[in-house]
Image (cartoon, grey):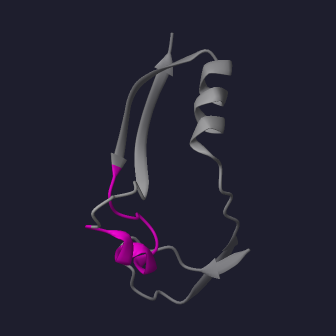
Amino acid sequence: MFEDVITYDGSDAGKGARSYWFAHPLGAIVTAIAAAGLRIESLTEHPHSNREIEFDKYQNQPAQLPLSYTLIAKCG
């Protein structure tokens, strides 16, 4: 459970509404999309985190791990 306000620039915006985060493996997400009958149009990995500035230390490494992604799926 978190009560920090979510910001995408890493700034401290104080406390906000209670929120919950769940780590879902990419395989589970893709499997759920397929099970729902959706078609993946694109999956783009990004070398930056869209939430936590603490993960910036993982950027620009010799073996770059994706820290976030954009997945687009549509019916049919």
> Looking at the image, which residue is at 40% across and 65% down?
49
Judge left or right: residue 43 versus residue 18.
Answer: left
Does the magenta portion include 52?
A: yes
> Looking at the image, which residue is at 36% across and 46% down?
45
Q: x and y percent of residue 2 in the render?
A: 68, 77
Does the magenta portion include 31?
A: no
Q: x and y percent of residue 68 in the render?
A: 43, 54
Looking at the image, which is closer to me, 45 or 15?
Answer: 45
Judge left or right: residue 56 versus residue 6.
Answer: left
| Vertical side of 64 occupied by 7: above or below | below
| Vertical side of 76 occupied by 12: above or below | below
* The quarter of the displayed image where residue 31 is located: top right
Which span of residues is magenta-colored?
A: 46-60
Residue farthest front in this picture: 62
Location of the N terminus by quadrant is bottom right
Q: x and y percent of residue 59 in the render?
A: 31, 68
> Looking at the image, which residue is at 44% across and 37% down?
71
| Vertical side of 40 occupied by 68: above or below | below
> Looking at the image, which residue is at 40% across and 43% down?
70
Looking at the image, which is closer to me, 11 or 62?
Answer: 62
The total number of labels drawn is 0
Q: x and y percent of residue 21 in the render?
A: 66, 63
| Vertical side of 2 occupied by 60: above or below | above
Looking at the image, which is closer to me, 30 or 1?
Answer: 30
